[in-house]
Image (cartoon, grey):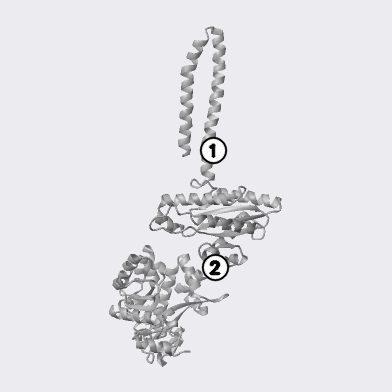
Amino acid sequence: MTPSRAAIKITIIYMVIGLVWILFSDRALELLVDDPATMMRMQTLKGWAYVLVTGVLFGLLAWTMLRKQRELHDFDTLTGLLNWYMFREAVDAQLQSAKLNNQQLGVAVINLDGFRQLNSQIGQRAGDALLQHVAGSIRSSFPTHATLGRVAADEFCIALRGDDIQRQIIDLIDRLQTELQPSLSHLQTTDAKQSVSCSAGIAVFPQDARQPKELITAANLALAEAKEKGQGHVCTYRQAYSDNVSRRATLVRDLANTLSRQSNPATTADASKTNPLYLAYQPQFSDPKGKMTSVEVLLRWAHPLHGNISPDTFIELAEQEGFIGKLTDYVCRTAVEELGTSGLLDTLDYVSINVSAHDINSATASEDFARRFEHDAATKQLVEAGKIQLEITETSVMQDKQQALHLLQMLKKRGYRISVDDFGTGYSSLSVISRLPVDELKIDRSFVTHLREDSNDYLIVRTIIAMAHALDLQVVAEGLENDAQLLLLQNLRCDKLQGYLLGRPVPLAQLKALHGTGHTST
């Protein structure tokens, strides 16, 4: 109830009682008292009684409304547990008590695994019932003096004082996990036959943190580690988590600053001196004895303090922080400039550039991505000439097939070549691939690494090549490392080959030398 509605309700009740008092109290006195002097004294007493009764009534009404408002302010309306704000206040109070009594204070953050997906399957009403059930299980699993809160849609917090508190909380969470196993027995639908599990992170005062905010942050860092391990894990805080967060923040800042400097023409000269972001090119061959016909562009980052940062690390950071598009722009623009200046671009069939799944599966990002290079005349000409190929992973295509189909059609109209990377890992069907406007399938290296004629990998590779050729698509095999793999792939008529056996990713200068001499396994 809003404050205005509560005030109106109190006023109406007060006025009704006042009118009833005025209408009937005088008539009652007239029936009971005949003496005028006595009547005057009774009227005075009646006035005092009115003030007393209505004052008490007003106080009761105000107290009731304020209590309801406080419950709404302090407690989660669905589960009755403390909300996020009040839980933090309660942890502060618990921490002061722990200091006075020389006790430990443990804070656990519990997250329901896969709740968002589950909630969409079973419906909001069943999802709310599940959350209420979980809240009840938490109440029954933890002692009455524990502080319990629901701090997000699928996240609960517990604060508990005592000795050896870390072990106590782990045991209590194990008990909770056991209680949650049959939680969906009364909520299951045809599409939701699964049990509920939770992941948890635990931090303890004083060894992990000494302030309420720091203690909760430490528990959240431990939870993040638990979620990375998979469903149903419980992790306790380690200082390494905080160090990782600090290092991550540093890398994000440094990557953004480096990208900004190298993308700014005014600072290109300065950036080229250290060149922390640079491109490597891995050649592809149609004939292992001939010259390279195309290249895959790979981005590298030589951090001035931390050395070479893995692409898996900094690409993920760029995706999470929202500047992966700028990174892709930089790669495309730099590759065109370097290969064009060196004269290699005219001799290559095309240049392959990897594309993030973020640009494929976000409707807003994909619309922007399809138009991204139109302002660059040189790049646009290369696109129209079919010189730029975008590599999109099979997994990203399969996440949202309709969105991917829409984007790929736009890219194809603008002249891009399309390659499906890591093919064979995304469980795509023949019907899906046949609908996609792609030019090439790139067999995932996991099938090439253990390729033998009597292996299942050989059957998979043979099937992929036959299917691709039936659809008039080219096939590239990556991860080629030995002559035995090369011979098998040649016998299967694989169109292009890529791997350390023929050529490693190299800077532009070495690529020029490689182009002039053929492949090398160095």
On the image, numbered disc 2 is attached to which residue? 248
Can residue 514 be seen from the camera position used here? yes
Question: As drawn, is 353 to the left or to the right of 169?
Answer: left
The residue positioned 47% from the left and 28% from the top of the image is 13
Q: Mark 2 near mark 1, Cβ–Cβ under 8 Å?
A: no
Q: Amino acid at mark 1?
A: Arg
- Compare residues 512 and 437 and report the one nearer the observer: 437
Secondary structure under the numbered disc 2 in the rendered image: helix
User: How many marks are shown on the rendered structure?
Assistant: 2
Res. 383 image quadrant: bottom left
Q: Is residue 198 left or right of residue 167?
A: left
The secondary structure type at the circle numbered 1 is helix
- Distance, label 2 to label 1, CA atoms, is 45 Å
Label annotation for residue 243: none
Residue positioned 59% across, 49% down in the render: 147
**At label 2, which amino acid type do we have?**
Arg
Q: Nearer the viewer, residue 485 or 153?
A: 485
Q: Quadrant of residue 450?
A: bottom left
Is 295 placed above or below 53 here?
below
Compared with residue 504, is residue 196 higher up or lower down, i.e. above or below?
A: above
Measured as percent of width and height from the top left, residue 163 is found at: 68, 55
**x, y percentage for residue 57?**
53, 28
Within 10 Å of the Cα at label 2, are there few (<14), some (14-19), or many (20+) other Cα atoms? some
Residue toward you, 430 or 358:
430
Seen at 45% across and 36% down, the residue is: 5
In the image: residue 221, left or right of residue 259: right
For the residue pair 165 and 421, the one nearer the viewer reads as 165
Q: Tell me, for residue 67, which label it has, or none.
A: 1
Compared to residue 517, the image places residue 118 above or below, namely above
- Residue 215 rendering spot, x and y as whole percentages: 61, 57
Q: Earlier in the sequence, mark 2 or mark 1?
A: 1
